[in-house]
Image: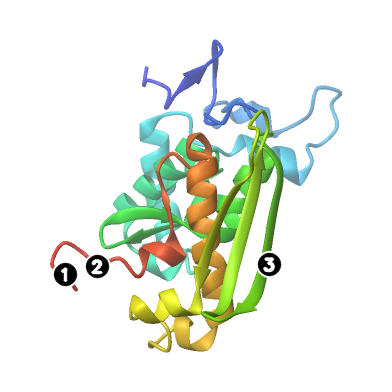
């Protein structure tokens, strides 16, 4: 028999996040037919059970998903990339289809989109609060993100300013920094704050909005 993808607490599970555990039942075809009282399962319960339990199942799942028009374009026709994206997502507690929507491969490295990162932090049970706001200062517009971690005496605060974006050659550049500059300032401050405050939740992943501005190994 194939080895399960991971085990936690004696039962097969895909969440490493300490507040979430779920049994993987994709190998059991009868588990999708009825609930314990004989009633048809809810859509949510069916979805939760359609999760690969072994690497072989994951590869089969990835092959099927990568051929779908509903698969994100960057993963379409690339089952190996789908497999790795799902595995990276599993590391931080995302379900397979969530991983495909939330994990990006940028310059050959995995990253997670900012909204998914915030959701993981809020679901972790480690955050008392995460606050974000923007201020107009002498350096131009500044985005601020502040997070209070349970058990820590002081909050973590990070900022990213319009002037810093200009110094880094980001402000006014093609793409989102030209189209949505306020949003990109917010995501950069969020990235630094969440990665500093909750490293055990994000497992070292950059936020995609930050990773997109990091040159690849060739310096491009």
Label 1 residue SS: loop
Task: Give the residue pinned by disc 3.
Answer: 133
Q: Quadrant of residue 33?
A: top right
Instruction: Tell me the residue at 84%/26% (across/down).
Output: 38
- Where's residue 163, x and y in %? 45, 79
Q: Kindly report which numbered mark, 1 or 3, lies closer to the viewer in this rendering.
A: 3
- Where's residue 186, x and y in %? 57, 68
Q: How far is disc 3 from disc 2 in space, using C-alphas?
A: 28 Å
Q: In the current view of this chain or complex, which residue is farthest to the front? A: 138
Q: Nearer the viewer, residue 10 or 176?
A: 176
Task: Give the residue pinned by disc 2.
Answer: 215
Task: Give the residue pinned by disc 1.
Answer: 219
**Image height check: is 157 above or below 214?**
above
Question: Can residue 6 be seen by looking at this rendering?
Answer: yes
Q: Residues within 10 Å of mark 1 (few under 14, many from 20)?
A: few
Look at the image and tell me in which quarter the N terminus lies.
top left
**Image height check: is 71 above or below 111?**
below
Of the two numbered discs 3 and 2 on the same chain, state the one appearing first in sequence. 3
Circle 2/circle 1 CB separation < 8 Å = yes
Q: Nearer the viewer, residue 213 or 85?
A: 213
Q: How far is disc 2 from disc 1 in space, using C-alphas?
A: 5 Å
């Amino acid at each position: 028999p194939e080895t399960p993808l991971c085990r936690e607490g004696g039962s097969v599970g895909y969440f490493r996040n300490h507040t979430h555990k779920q049994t993987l039942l994709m190998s059991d075809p009868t588990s999708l037919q009825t609930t314990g009282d004989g009633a048809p399962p809810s859509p949510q319960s069916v979805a939760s059970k359609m999760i690969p339990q072994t690497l072989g199942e994951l590869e089969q799942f990835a092959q099927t998903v990568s051929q779908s028009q509903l698969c994100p374009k960057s993963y379409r026709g690339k089952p190996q990339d789908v497999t790795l994206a799902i595995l990276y997502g599993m590391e931080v507690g995302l379900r397979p289809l969530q991983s495909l929507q939330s994990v990006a491969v940028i310059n050959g490295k995995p990253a997670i989109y900012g909204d998914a990162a915030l959701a993981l932090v809020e679901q972790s049970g480690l955050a008392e609060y995460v606050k974000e706001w923007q201020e107009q200062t002498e350096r131009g517009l500044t985005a601020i993100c502040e997070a209070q971690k349970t058990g820590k005496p002081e909050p973590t605060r990070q900022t990213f300013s319009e002037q810093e974006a200009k110094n880094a050659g980001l402000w006014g550049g093609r793409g989102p920094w030209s189209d949505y500059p306020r949003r990109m300032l917010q995501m950069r401050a969020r990235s630094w704050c969440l990665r500093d405050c909750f490293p055990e939740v994000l497992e070292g992943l950059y936020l995609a909005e930050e990773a997109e501005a990091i040159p690849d190994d060739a310096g491009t």
